[in-house]
Amino acid sequence: MTVPAPLRSRAIRLYKELLFLGRDYPHPQRFPWFRARLKRAFQGKASLTDPVEIEKALAHGDYGKREIEVFVF
């Protein structure tokens, strides 16, 4: 079973948005540390094919994005 195109594009957009927010992440190693963690998180979910599970993962990522926005800005 393949991933529907709208879900795939949402996941890519979420990844890019999180990557953009990670530039200002307040950690001693900053962006390289954040990018490695983000990549590992997305690779861990790469095998999902069920649209419901993908929606849950995207919702979790959106929540994380809001938390980072509050924390950074």
Image: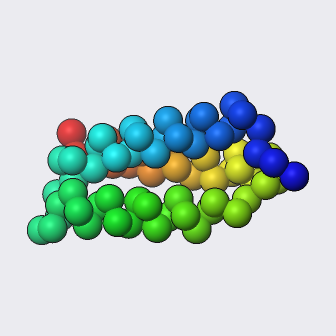
Check the image and tell me how it is coloured: rainbow
Left or right? Give the position of 36 relative to 49: left
Q: What x and y, as percent, mark residue 31? A: 21, 57
In the rendered image, which quarter is residue 4 located in? top right
Q: Which residue is at a point 45% across and 51% down the rendered structure image?
A: 64
Single out the residue that lies furthest toward the front: 2
Res 70 visible:
no
Q: Which residue is at a point 70% across and 45% down the rendered structure image?
A: 55
Is 26 situated above or below 2? below
In the rendered image, which quarter is residue 48 located in? bottom right
Q: Which residue is at a point 53% across and 59% down the rendered structure image?
A: 42
Left or right? Give the position of 8 relative to 40: right
Residue sitting nearer the eye, 8 or 57: 8
Is 27 situated above or below 72? below
Residue sitting nearer the eye, 67 or 13: 13
Q: Count the labels in the image.
A: 0
Residue sitting nearer the eye, 10 or 27: 10
In the rendered image, which quarter is residue 33 located in? bottom left
Res 4 visible:
yes
Residue sitting nearer the eye, 2 or 19: 2
Single out the residue that lies furthest toward the right: 1
Q: Assign the C terminus to one quadrant of the image.
A: top left
Is 26 situated above or below 67? below
Q: What x and y, as percent, mark residue 6? A: 69, 31
Q: Which residue is at a point 72% across and 34% down the rendered structure image?
A: 5
Left or right? Give the position of 70 relative to 63: left
Single out the residue that lies furthest toward the top: 6
